[in-house]
Amino acid sequence: MGLSPAVRLLAGLSLVVSATAAASQLNIVPLPAKYATGDAVVCLTHDFEVKFDNDPPQDLISAASRMVKRLRCIQHTYLSPSRGAEFLANGGCNGYIDSLHLSVSNPGTVFAHATKPIGQRNETYELSVPTSGKATGKAETALGAFRALTTFENLWFTTQLDPGMSLQVPLDCPARIIFAPFAPYNINDAPAFRWRAVLLDTSRHFFPLPSLRAMLDAMAAVKLNVFHWHVTDSNSWPLDLSALPELVRGAYSSQQIYSEDDVRELVTYAGERGIDVVLEIDTPGHTASIGESHPDFIACLNAPWKDNANQPPAGQLRFADDAVVDYTTAIFTAAAELLSSAYFGTGGDELNLRCMRDDGPTQATLKEKGWTLEDALLQFTNRTHAVLLKKGLTPIVWQEMVLDHGDLKLSVDTVVEVWLSSAHTRAVLDKGFRVVHAASDFFYLDCGHGGWLPPGGNSWCDPFKPWTKMLSFDPYANVADYQRHLVLGGQVSLWAEQTDDANLESVMWPRAAASAELWWSGGPGDTINALPRMHDMRYRLLGRGVRAAPLQPEWCALRAGACVL
Amino acid sequence: MGLSPAVRLLAGLSLVVSATAAASQLNIVPLPAKYATGDAVVCLTHDFEVKFDNDPPQDLISAASRMVKRLRCIQHTYLSPSRGAEFLANGGCNGYIDSLHLSVSNPGTVFAHATKPIGQRNETYELSVPTSGKATGKAETALGAFRALTTFENLWFTTQLDPGMSLQVPLDCPARIIFAPFAPYNINDAPAFRWRAVLLDTSRHFFPLPSLRAMLDAMAAVKLNVFHWHVTDSNSWPLDLSALPELVRGAYSSQQIYSEDDVRELVTYAGERGIDVVLEIDTPGHTASIGESHPDFIACLNAPWKDNANQPPAGQLRFADDAVVDYTTAIFTAAAELLSSAYFGTGGDELNLRCMRDDGPTQATLKEKGWTLEDALLQFTNRTHAVLLKKGLTPIVWQEMVLDHGDLKLSVDTVVEVWLSSAHTRAVLDKGFRVVHAASDFFYLDCGHGGWLPPGGNSWCDPFKPWTKMLSFDPYANVADYQRHLVLGGQVSLWAEQTDDANLESVMWPRAAASAELWWSGGPGDTINALPRMHDMRYRLLGRGVRAAPLQPEWCALRAGACVL
């Protein structure tokens, strides 16, 4: 295997570009919409660089620079018994790629395009990697060009490394062969769905910022584009808002807090990687942690959880109370200031009615105003949503807000997340709302790890949802043709009862990559077709330092298709 | 909080030693057999040391030195909302412990005692930590003294650290307060069961040596005492035997191999930590990887796995063949040389009969010898076991070897592992064999992560086995009184289809600690009583750099007993 580009350049390769044969030759997750591959082995020159045909935004330049740096240190080997040596055995590289030329026709940064309302997000790109010379990427937006960079990066392999080193990305890398075995590659790509989200709950456990950044990097590697940040809940309140500094009395500790700068920096970090950070402040349930600073705002605080909540601790906002409405409005206002998204999550799940019925102050207010509880919820919802709507933000709510509490007169633009069951999707669509598929029966990453409340038993949403289950979801099952435009996409959710920094990555990855494929490539997906690519993506993530779990024995990972039922 | 020992020494503390009240005051997993605690806060002096009353073996001295080093750098904080600050708020430490005096009455190293036949293993110890001055530990054997050291270490906490640092144990540690809040502690301890094992499969995935050493360290922290090393299987053959160097052609790569020195070093490392390494070479099934070097020895090699095996790849020894018997004998002989255990695993699970019936060479041999397949298996088993018995080793087999293939005339000492279902235990006992509980319905760490063969479905041994399930097992259910002595203990098993180095620790821990409690403290255990201690042990492991998974939201971990059904 030669290391010198010059001697390896071959002309006149015989290329077979066949979409059928290519099915197992393009190792990209998510699978591009259209592609063709060949049978030439191309390598990167050691001075490979990304060039821009016009004046690119700074965050696209930075993204290209990060990609080149990662490629120079690539850890990922081809998955075959000989780890790709078979491609280099006969004469080595057939040709060399010395540059990737990116052209972007519209102005604007990656960040700017990633944080637009989803109807305005353009992620389309074209990518062409010939058998030698320069590769080209073309996109209308910097966001599309960012997706082209991601696809380009995932085409490459290096030769065998020490597998014991796979979790340690070296800081400086000895020269290595970097090859792609099925050139030329010609890819025309755009997502099937524009909402491709990961939810992480940072209340049940706190996740340090470096872990969140690592998660965003992994999301970007599979073109996931929304981080639904369920930042607060009853367990802890880690969000430090300078206008309401008392709230972090509800944090686990003074070190388990996200400052406003932390949030802003994370929003920027995400946006530069094509990801929109949608913050959720779940109200009026799931708010016991506000009781640490404002016990007077919280019903059934410190009450027995079994009667007053779905899980400990009990406590939810006294939403009939004007002062509580004002305070919630202040929280939303302060939190929204930190974000760049067009969306804001207001929650609305699992409101415990018994807690409110037994709450003296709430009942007194209702009596005084002549309201039912639903009247109060309508007031609370409309007034708290009003501040968001006024800022031009679109609220995101859980399904109960449109299915369980009468007509809360939500803005028709409201995005509704279906979580209890995928069977509930149609009911939400029939009310005319836009839907994000986030159903626990397909997309909950936390299911299936056993009941966490002793004496024990199974997980409430048993069984575990394997990647095959996620990928086999049909986004349009039981959706009328005239409702299809209301399906925005989907989300995998990681509720953190049994997850913290210790197991975050292996619980999330590579399963979230399967959901990325579902929402990018359309679904239901073909799990047997996707298997080799899922293996590739898993080991690729591992090579980037992500503790993604293995899907099958290594014997199977090295032998595409050998391990299916 | 003072850092000077002298000024904090208080005399005449009022001590309440109450076994009932102490239930939530002793944070030890596994719970000692007998113990009493008090209400004084004792601290370690900065020059704390372990002293020996007589001439101790070198490996016990080293263990004490490692413990002191870890205690000086202890990361673990008390689990309460104020992280233990409540114990130091009123005057700080009530007294100081400057030394632990260990006395051992019998000769022999930790290693020597850990690798004895289990009837001769003595792990009994006494430990006394007063409210000031010197602590004392007493044991008949160095192994018992090692257990005393482990218990002693797990009594201590430090004050609040940066939780973001919890997975990074610092190399040098700033001075910190190290305290135990319920002194005096008086502990009399011995295990209920002598076989407390973890099985790890290093064939479906390779685990680097540092990971195996880290696993042994974590096992020692909860007094697990057998590492059942399922070193080879059909997927790969990582064991490099110098007498049979061709076998590692079945390894995943030249870097995914255990050399003889590796094995010997690991056996030593384990024994010095009170752990017996029991190697298993699974035969005659689960041997396809031998086909890489000896295809002629393997039936149904490269045949469709669905007809010939429970999972890919198919391939098992042609056990009717004399040359195969001789070769297997040579493997056992070479492997046994590396070990110090009195036990050796020979496997015997999941023999696929159809593979043998369709195998031309096997059928020819049977016809020639006038044998049935069971006759052949009897010959194979007796001849391969004979070399072990001759060396004084006791074979360990899976349940099929006594339940499924007629009377294979196994030595009555053979240890039988029940794995398919705990319902099968009685049948094995009724044949007079000793039993290790390893049933998949309670003790399989790999269950419940989804079917790994696309198109998908659930895990064959769904659902996931949470720690509560493991701890609630009754070792003597359906066991006659006269058979109780045949129950040696139990084992959690981690078959590595969906586990490698990336998720090993979070799949294994802290669940293996619950099994440690079951087998040390007896069972069935009380999950609600154990919950706060399991939390403590989980965070303690985390503080030692082990990626143990969280059991509940941190809110619950900080509030003992708040989160139960």
Image (cartoon, coloured by chain):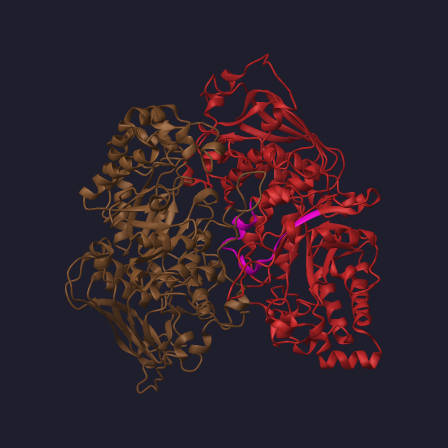
Chain colours: A brown, B red
Residue B321 screen position, x and y as percent: 76, 76
Q: Please name the residue shown 29% across and 42% down the image.
A: A408
User: Number of marks in the image?
Assistant: 0
Which of the two residues, B415 or A464, is positioned nearer the viewer here?
A: A464
Could you tell me if residue A211 is visible in this image? no
Whether B560 is drawn above or below B143: the answer is: above
Image location (x, y in percent) of residue A515:
40, 59
Q: In front: B140, or A404?
A: A404
Say left or right for B11 vs A194.
right
Left or right of B28 in this view: A535:
left
Asked if residue B116 lies left or right of residue B175, the reply is right
Please tell me whether residue A337 is drawn above or below residue B434 in the rendered image. Answer: above
For the question of whether residue A543 can be seen, the reply is yes
Quarter of the image with the C terminus of chain A in it: bottom right
Q: Position of residue B350 (x, y in %)?
A: 69, 64
* Of B7 and B476, the residue lying toward us: B476
Q: Which segment did they paint magenta?
A: B490-509
Decide whether residue B556 is among the magenta residues: no
Q: Residue at x 51, y 38 (%)?
A: B539
Q: Quadrant of residue A475?
A: bottom left
Write down the quadrant of residue A32 in the picture.
Answer: bottom left
**Magenta span has B507?**
yes
Tell which residue pokes out farthest to the top in this image: B12
Does residue A372 sit above or below A143 in this rendering?
above
User: In what quadrant of the picture does the N terminus of chain A appear?
Assistant: bottom left
Rendering coords of residue A351 (x, y %): 39, 38
Identify the residue at image location x=32%, y=43%: A280
